[in-house]
Every structure is written in C-alpha cells, then in structure tokens.
Image (cartoon, helix red, strand yellow):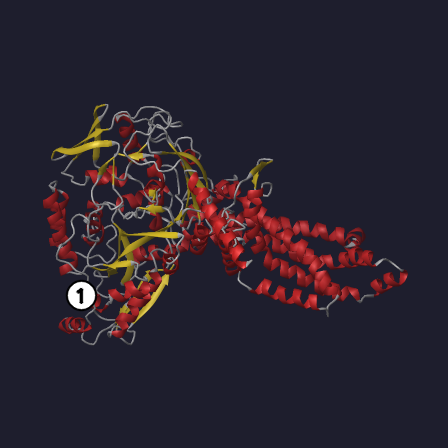
Amino acid sequence: MLFMSFLVFSGVYVIGDPVDILISDEADAEDRQRAIEGLGLDKPFHIQYLTFLGRALQGDLGDSFIFEEPALGLILERMPATLELALSALLIAIVIGIPLGMWAGMRPESKSARVIMTGSILGFSLPTFWVGIMMMMLFAVQLRWLPSTGRGDTVDLLGIDVSFLTLDGLSHLAMPAINLALFNLALVLRLTRAGVKEVVHQDFIKFARAKGVGRRRIVLVHILKNIMIPVVTVLGLEFGGLVAFSIVTETVFAWPGMGKLLIESIGLLDRPVIVAYLTIILLFFVIINLVVDVLYSILDPRVRLQEVKS
Amino acid sequence: MNRIARLGLALMATTMISGTALADDVTIGIRTEPSSMDPYFHNLGPNNAMLGQIFGRLVEWPPAMDKIIPRLATSWKAIDDTTWEFKLREGVKFHDGTAFTADDVLFSFARADGYTGGNSSFRTYTKGKTVTKVDDFTIHIKTEAPYPLMPNDMTTLMIMSSEAKGTGGEANNGIKAKDFNDGLATMGTGPYKFVEWKKGDQIVVEKYDGYAGPMAQPWDKITFKVIKSDPARTAALLAGDVDMIDDVATPDIPALKTNDAVALSQGVSNRVIYIHIDQFRDVSPFVTDKAGNALTKNPLKDARVRKALSKMIDRDEIVEKVMEGVAIKAGQLLPEGFFGRSPNLKPDAYDPEGAKALLAEAGWADGFALTIHGPNNRYINDGKIAEAIAQMLTRNGIPTKVETMPSSVYFKRASSGGPDKTPEFSFFLVGWGAGSGEPSSPLKSLLATVDASKGQGASNRGQHSDPELDAVLVEALATVDDDKRAALLAKATDIGIGRNMGIIPLHYQVNTWATRKGLKYEARADERTVGINLIKDN
C-alpha cells in the first residue's frame, strides 16, 4: 500500500498540478501563486509526500483540490451507488449466466445451446459504451420504457441511500446494471458450460446415475457444486473489477458513482481523490480475495481437509 | 394494427411531453457541474452560472453581453476619477428573510478578498479596491488609480448574507466549502434558492417567493442533472428525461436540427480560439529546418512570418468542415457586438500567394518545419482544429507535425513546461473567454509584455512584447470615458494583432443548447447555462 501510494502520488505529481486547469483566465501571476500556495503545491515533492503520509496514518487522506472536502468522504458518499450497481450486475450475471451455461453444457449439440453460445460471444466482445448507448437509444429514446440516465429516487436503508427499493430507482438501475453485467454474464456462462461439459463425463456422475439418483439432484447438487470453484474465483475477482472499473457504464448512464468521480478527478488532476480512491480499491481487492478463500472452503471439502491435516 | 400502434406511441409521446409542461418544473442536463456552492471558492464557468441564480450580483451581463444591467445595484457612476458610487436596491430580502443592505456587500467583498482556500479566487476583482458604506443603500468603491472597469468587475462578484449560518458575522472565519455544499451557508438574494446538491448526480433549486429583483422566475423548481457524456446528454433530451441540454456536440447538431420535437438555440460566445507563437526564444524548440535539424534563429520572431502563417490558414474550411458550420471566423479578440473592438480588422482570408510573398520578404522563402500543440478535450473540436491547421501549413510549404494531449497535461506544459518554467511549445492552440465583455482582459493577459509586478502578460505564453501596445493599453485602462477607452482598446488591438500578429485568432466558439419543442433558451455569450434564461415559447 505504501508502494502504491508512492507510485500514484509521484505519477500524478509528474503530470502537473490542477492550478493550470482550474485557474480563471483573468487571474494574474499573483493570484496564481496564491492558489498554488493555498493547495500546498509550492512545496517540494518529498515534503508534500511526507505530509500526505503523516496524515494518511491518522486516517486523513487529504482534502480534494477541487471540492475542498475530505477525499475519503467524497468517495464514501458515492460508494453506495457504485456498490449497488456492481452487486446488481453481479446478481444478473449469476442468475442468468449459470442456468444458461448449465443448459448449454448439458446439451452442447442442441440448437438452443448454439444460440446461447453465439450470444455470449457478442456479450464479451461488444464494447460496453457502445452497447450502453444502443440500449439507451432503444429503450429510452425509441420505446421510452426506461429513463435514459441518472439514479432516480433513493430510499434510506440503514443510513445508506439505495435505489432498488423504489420503482423509479429500479427503472433507472435496470439499464446500467444490465450493461455492466453483460461481459460477466458471458464469462460466467462460458465458464459454467465448460465446467459442466467436463464434470458430466466424470465417474462420480456416472456412478450417481447408476445408483439411481434423480436427474434433478445430479444437476443441482453434484454438478453445480463441482463447477462452482472456478466460477466463484472468477466472479470474486470480477466483482472487484466491476466496482473498480464501472467507470464506462457510470459515465455513459450518468450514474453518480465513484468510478465517475475517479475519471473526473483524473481529468482535473485532483491528486488526493485519485490516491484515496486507489487505496480504497486496493483494500477492496484484499477483502474480496479473503471472501473468495472462505467460499472455497465451504464449497470444496478438500480445502478444509488440507487445513485440518496441516 | 401497425398504424394503431404507431398512433398509440405518438399519443403516448405527446402526453408525456405535455405532462412535463403542465407543472412548472424543468429539468436541465448539464455537461459540467460546479465544483462548489461557495460563491467565492472557484472562479469557474459552471460555478458562476449555477450560483448566479442563488446569489445575486450588484450588476450583471444580459445574454448578449452588450451592456451591463442593474441587479442588486440600481445605478452606478464614477463620482470622481478614483471613486465609484453604487446605489443599492431597497426592499430586497435574503432567502431566510433578513434584509439586504450595504453591510452584506462589504461582508462579501471582505470574504472574496481574504479568501485563502480554493483554486482561483475572486481576489482578482477585489484587490486594490476599498469599499465603504455611505448609508444602508449606498456604497463607494475607491481605487488608487482611475479604474474604468469597476462595473465589469462587479458582474463577477456574488453577494451573500452577512448573517448566513456558520459565518458568525465574520467574513473569513474558516467556514469551509462543505458548509455551502450542504446548504447551510448558501444564503443569497437570487430568484432561486438552494435545495440540494447530490454530487455527480443533480442540483435542485426552487423559486424564491420573496424575490423582489428584476430577474425573471420562469419555473417553480429547476433540476440540473449532470450528464457528462455527449451522446447520453442528447439521448436524455430525446427520451424526454430532460427539457434542455447544454454543450450539444457538433456531430449531433444536424440530426437535432431536423428533429421536430427539438429546438436549438445558438449564440456566439466571448471565447476566441487562437494560436500562441513563441516570440521570446532565439531558438524555438519546435521550429526546425525541413530535415528536422535545429535552426540558428527563430523565424516566428518576425511579424511577417507570423502574418504569413495566418494567411495559410483557411478559416472558412475550419468553420465549415471541422466545426460543421458552428463557429464564426475571427480576426481579433472578440466577436462583433462587443465593446472596444477594432473596426479595421477582418479575419485573414486564405491567401497562399500572399503568404509566400511575405515569407520570401522575411528571408524564409524555403520555409521551415513546425510542430503545432493543442489540447484535445478542452475546446470544441480542439484536436481536430490543430490537425486541420497542420495540413494547411504543410500544403503551403511549412511541414507541420501535430501533437495533442488532454488538457490536464497540456496546460501545465503550455504555461511552464520548458526550462526555467517558460512555456514549452512554439506554436500552440488555446482559447480565451473575455469575462469582462471587452478586450482589455485578453490584451492585458495575452499580448501585453510579461510583467508579474504589474499583473500583465499572465497568460502571454508566446511572450509577445511591444512597448507601444503596452503604453496604449495602460492609457486605456486608466480612461474612464467609455468612448475614448473603446478607441484606445481598438488601437491596442490594431497594434497587437493587425500590425504584429502577436497571436493568430482563428474563430469564435458558438455554443449550442437544445430544448424540447415549446421552450426557448436565450443563448448566452458567456456560455452559462442558467434556468432563468430558459423560457416558454408558444
């Protein structure tokens, strides 16, 4: 984390400072100097960095240059929107991706399986922003079924604003969530199919079938459990990706999440926000990996047995 | 069946549109959101637009920026060479019901002047000025030297309540931008009051019933939705989610023009797009011979070469092809209709022969090679303009390379990327919006000799210098008589551009807003998007 903070800090430092972008045309040299001093950008690099580190250790990641509010607060304020979007996308990917993948894996030669597989190629090869704009043109402009942009009404749930509890919020959430889910949906679908195709032919399935276990139980318990490990791994990592890189979807649909904040902060060289954002994302990935590891041991008895042995 | 379905859709569409028209609420899709609700935090277009509706100003520009009009001040005049008197409007109340008096003006002045945070303070307009209260509704503003631009400066400064919460009656007590962003201290006299700001999402303002000023209040509630992406903003308008959008992307304009459900409004802005030319280095880093070797002298120092380059640029083609007709070619610092323009200057016509002759006269008949630098996300089509210019120069014997970059990288390098914090580039594209509505600000910043102690040449990145221009400009800035000052400003422009071609003006930006049918936006020359200029058009 120290390394990352240094990397990002120096990287943004090298590009420049926001004063050149933000200062009004009319300002003269004296005003410019005042602005630079006001932001603490007149000090040498190592002093700036050490000041930042000292404060960061006390949990203060600095004030945004642009908003003059704590960078951490700005990000946390927008985090629920992004999390909601990413979780919805993940849910869509799982709920649609796994059944379709299993269907395609059980009947690899059928027509429906082929249609699903071809569809999945589109899912991960079409660029997100293009699909987003196309969806907007179709569902918002032409059919007028869904609102084009924004987040809609939110409800306070345990102190966090959420939009999935209102109809208006849901209708706003639908398009961005599906848009963000498409890539992962295709990914989950293909992983599931590959897993099913492999597992179906293994001895324990044949044995179970010979033993007279119902088809339903074979599919839902024996096959599903065995294919879940790669799917969970990938989904875990992808969830981090969804949160960190929902930028494109958020920008297209004007979703007020933290990805949009990041892209705007980069454009304006708002260094405290960029550094704080990446620090949070780093933490996020660490937590997700932990959760994935825990899920492994639940899904795969072998992992638990190894732990016991050692 | 098909026909019925289509009819149904059409009906649905009309009911949806009229549905929004019945309630006097309006939703506007804006590209850039303000950075703060603190009126002294950041002198930035979106902030000045948004906050101007909430906080009043003493005087203001109308959309065309042709003549300053009264707001919180009812009249103003220079009572002697160094004193301006402003009479204030009586009976005005802040949103919390407290009365507006001269004390609030003094308070706002003190706050702007002493403000230490923020990025680009309003101190530019308060320094060197002393405000005194004569009575509750009269103030005097004194300067050390004659200062004709006092009303112009007062179009920028917003007035807040001296009794706003959190201030404790003290102008600079460390109250933070956050207190304004949360609405605590956001206390003005404007026609609309602050309701909420969800960052990155929306800003809501509501009609202030006690408003007693001259501004219109066409709506009960105005919601500003932040939609940064260009196609998404257009889609939001077409989908009926918003009633108006600003900054319509040029590629979308032809399609919107033919759409019956949409009305466009366009207006020339006070922003000129121009090229800075390195005139201070004897050897300029991005000017080489045609083989790419360094030259021993800098051809750009010669005014004839600069004029030749200007003649090689086909402004008609830039306006037609690059800007899709949405721009006006420029021959000076401000478009027609503004104060202090030169009557003598016309946009340079495309004239390859004339350019060749000038180059030969200057001893550069064989030409040289250049690199043009420009931002690619700051002005309308900026990257494409730089490319077009490079092609035009190359066609006329000045092989030109193009390098464009995001503005976050560009401006640092363009202002101080070279050795000793000098500007890095030799020939580079920038824009300038004259907020003061007359040419003294660009003359002072872009063409006057660089001198930090006098506050001159702050953005003179080519470091053009002409003592005669400096002298005329200094005289103009001290001339209170409008007609005389206009003549002097025109003369300074004649010298800086007509005679010296210190910068090469290209075109004035034209801004485009799109509304749904039935509404009309009065296009503003200062590029602001404000609810009060959006009116019903039946």
The front one of B141 and B512 is: B512
Residue A91 can be seen, yes or no:
yes
Q: Position of residue B461 (x, y in %)?
A: 25, 56
Residue B421 can be seen, yes or no:
no
Q: Position of residue A244 (x, y in %)?
A: 55, 52
| Left or right placement of residue B509 versus residue A229 in this view | left
Q: Residue at x 76, y 57 (%)?
A: A224
Residue holding disc 1: B307
Query: How dense is the environment of label 1, judged by Cα within 10 Å: few (below 14), some, or many (20 and up)?
Result: many
Q: Position of residue A104 (x, y in %)?
A: 71, 64
Residue at the limit of the structure toward the right, as seen here: A211
Chain of the residue under the numbered disc 1 shown in the image = B
| Left or right placement of residue A249 versus residue B477 in this view | right
Residue B300 is drawn in which quadrant? Answer: bottom left
| Left or right placement of residue A223 versus residue B159 in this view | right
The front one of A139 and B327 is: A139
Q: Residue at x 23, y 28 (%)?
A: B88
Residue at the limit of the structure toward the left, as seen here: B484
Q: Residue at x 26, y 32 (%)?
A: B72
Q: Position of residue B303 (x, y in %)?
A: 16, 64
At mark 1, the secondary structure is: helix
Quick check: A114 above or below B493? below
Q: Amino acid at mark 1?
A: Lys
Quick check: A73 above or below B250? above
| Left or right placement of residue A87 versus residue B10 in this view | right
The front one of A310 and B355 is: B355
